[in-house]
Amino acid sequence: KNQVEQSPQSLIILEGKNCTLQCNYTVSPFSNLRWYKQDTGRGPVSLTIMTFSENTKSNGRYTATLDADTKQSSLHITASQLSDSASYICVVRDGATNKLIFGTGTLLAVQP
Amino acid sequence: DAGITQSPRYKITETGRQVTLMCHQTWSHSYMFWYRQDLGHGLRLIYYSAAADITDKGEVPDGYVVSRSKTENFPLTLESATRSQTSVYFCASRGPTYNEQFFGPGTRLTVL
């Protein structure tokens, strides 16, 4: 069964610190992987998207990595800010059906 | 304003009542989607539409009806609301680049 699992479920860090969120998937065939940021009470907003041939992609203080061999991705946040407090969702596109498989998200709280 | 909007943002209704959630996008995207988001679950696809007058079921379609007479609108109707349909509903449209989905702000629906 195609699944996307994220860890940890929740995370608390101090402002200015770095953190890394993990995403493991079993989706096959793989098309692409996206990371979304969802602020409380808002819809998800895309941070990065990576295809099979891309190992890393950055968007400001956000850097996503992809290991298609081990079917793992990570999202690294550098020098966290209070505004980074949100849920981060990993989403994998099924290359056969073209449908998106969503993880349940990691809830990040950045404290001053 | 350009983008994707949903209305109402909050709705409380009673079991058995009919409820319609509205979604409007200004990009003229062909594809539109309805998802529900519940604790412990990733976003789950209810229905999607490839174009006006073309709709198809997603992962959890039971109890929902959609229509799409115009490209820009994609309403979701709960014909007889049940408590299990209490959720946050997100509408999305798909752009041409990497098939990225753009999400609306969501509608929080409570069925009493």
Image (spheres, grey):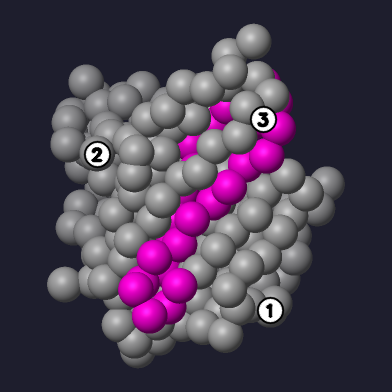
Asked whether the residues under the numbered discs 1 and 3 touch, taking CB atoms below 8 Å apart as contact, a structural biologist would say no
The reply to whether residue A20 is visible in this rendering is yes
Instruction: Give the residue at x 18% y 58%.
Output: B62
Residue beneath the point at 34% across and 49% down: A6
> Which region of the structure is painted magenta?
A67-92
From what the image shows, is residue A95 above or below residue A86? below
> Which residue was labeled with disc 3?
A80
- The three-letter amino acid code for the residue at tag 3 is Ser
Q: Residue furthest right?
A: B1
Q: Which residue is mark 2?
A: B40
Please tell me whether residue A20 is drawn above or below residue B109 in the rendered image: below
Front residue of B44/A20: it is A20
Between residue B41 and residue B90, name the one nearer to us.
B41
- Distance, label 3 to label 2, CA atoms, is 26 Å
Q: Chain of mark 2?
A: B
Q: Secondary structure at mark 2?
A: loop
Q: Secondary structure at mark 1?
A: loop
